[in-house]
Each structure stands twice: as C-alpha cells, then as structure tokens.
Amino acid sequence: MHVKFTGMHTSDAIKGRRSVKRFAERAVSREEIETLLAAATLAPNHKLTQPWRFYVLGPEARYAYGLALGARKAKKIADTAAGAALRETVGAEHRALPGMIAVAVMNHDNPETREEDYAAAMMAVQNIALTAVALGLGTHMKTGSVMSDPAARAAVGLPDDQRIVAIVNVGVPAEDVPAKKREPASAFTTWVP
Ligand SMILES: Cc1cc2nc3c(=O)[nH]c(=O)nc-3n(C[C@H](O)[C@H](O)[C@H](O)COP(=O)(O)O)c2cc1C
C-alpha cells in the first residue's frame, strides 16, 4: 500500500490529534509504520544520542504484552476465574489492535543525559502522533508501571539496557473523539520582563 499524506498543515495535525481508542479493522501497513518511525527519528535530541528504540509488535507480541497488562489488572480482583478471564480479554484486545509500537529509550548512566534522552524519546512519540494524523491514522499513547513488568519487557524482547517509555497504538480511527477541554495558554503563561 502506498503511503499518502493528506497535505495537512502542521497546526491542523496538532489540533486534530486525539487519543483514539477504537480502531477500524484494517491493518496498518509496514510502509505507514516506517513513515511514522522516520518522523520519530527527526525529533530533537541533545548530543545526537538518538536514544529511541522502536519495537513494532506483531499479533503474538501484542497478545503477550496484553496478557502482562491483564495479569496486573487481574491481581486487583479477588475472584480467580474472573481474573483469568480479564487477563485473557486484555490479551485478546491487544492482539486485535491494528498496530502497536513500544517506544523504548537507552538507559544512560548520566542522570542529566538520561532525562534529556527521555525527553527526546517523548518528542519522537509526538512526531509519530502528528504524522499519523497527517496520514489519516489515529494513535493512543499509553504508559504505566506495566512497562517495567518483566512479562511486558519479555513480550517486547527488550534488552536490559533499555526501558519502555510509551506504548503507541496506531490504526484508522473508528470513532470521532471530541477534543478535551483545555485552558487557554494565557492561564499558564507568565510574561517575564
Ligand atoms: C505521558 C502520557 C502518558 C499517557 N498514558 C496513558 C495511559 O496509560 N492510558 C491512557 O488511556 N491514556 C494515556 N495517555 C493519553 C492521555 O490520557 C490523553 O492524551 C489525554 O486524555 C488528552 O486526550 P487527547 O490525547 O485526546 O487530547 C497518556 C498521555 C501521555 C502524554
């Protein structure tokens, strides 16, 4: 499938981005994912550390990651059978996703570089999200303690010197997500003379 940009202005992509939770069944093509990741690598990064590592998860890996997440949710339920069913449901939901990218970052020994590298990786995530909008795709970024769960790390095949900083689900949106209300920038801005 040929990747086709909509020719959308960046500010429209920024305004049009939403966290999309329901996707159409159509798979995301390899070319589309490669386009998103090419945009990710253009993010600013101090000292050109290029700290990001991308894991494009296929159905088996998505299922395994979902099971890891589901197992954590299941632990909060007293009923063992209901917990096992929930784990399986979450696993199946992840397997059914059209696209899922785990964004990881190299663990640097220097705390300052570590923070900068994390920031750069998150900028890469935003490049993915905005480029997706320009391709007519939607994304949902997710984080949480599951990212450091050994089962989740194993699902991704993560080496010891990296940590996951975001999961980005990708697909053709199957819902119109209304914009969430934001305060105007003036509410957060101080003009310092
Ligand atoms: C660092 C970060 C972590 C997030 N983690 C989650 C998450 O774990 N689960 C989730 O449902 N949404 C997560 N989100 C999505 C936010 O909930 C979402 O961006 C917010 O509700 C605003 O909605 P919008 O993205 O449609 O504008 C995360 C967003 C960011 C920036």
Image: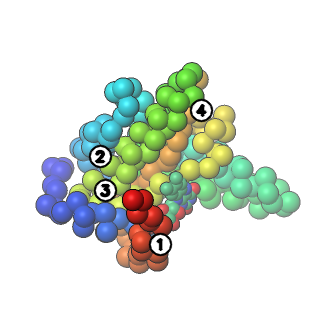
Q: Secondary structure at mark 1?
A: helix
Upstream in the sequence, badge 4 or badge 2? 2
Say which mark, if any, is on residue 154.
4
Mark 1 or 3, closer to the camera: 1
Q: Is residue 144 left or right of residue 122?
A: right
Q: Which residue is mark 2?
A: 36
Q: CA distance from mark 3 to mark 4?
A: 29 Å
Q: CA distance from mark 2 to mark 1?
A: 33 Å
Q: Which residue is mark 1?
A: 187
Q: CA distance from mark 1 to mark 3?
A: 25 Å
Q: Which residue is mark 3?
A: 130
Q: CA distance from mark 4 to mark 2?
A: 24 Å
Q: Secondary structure at mark 4?
A: helix
Q: Position of residue 109 (x, y in %)?
A: 57, 21
Q: Residues within 10 Å of mark 4 (few under 14, many from 20)?
A: some
Marks 4,2: beta carbons within 8 A: no
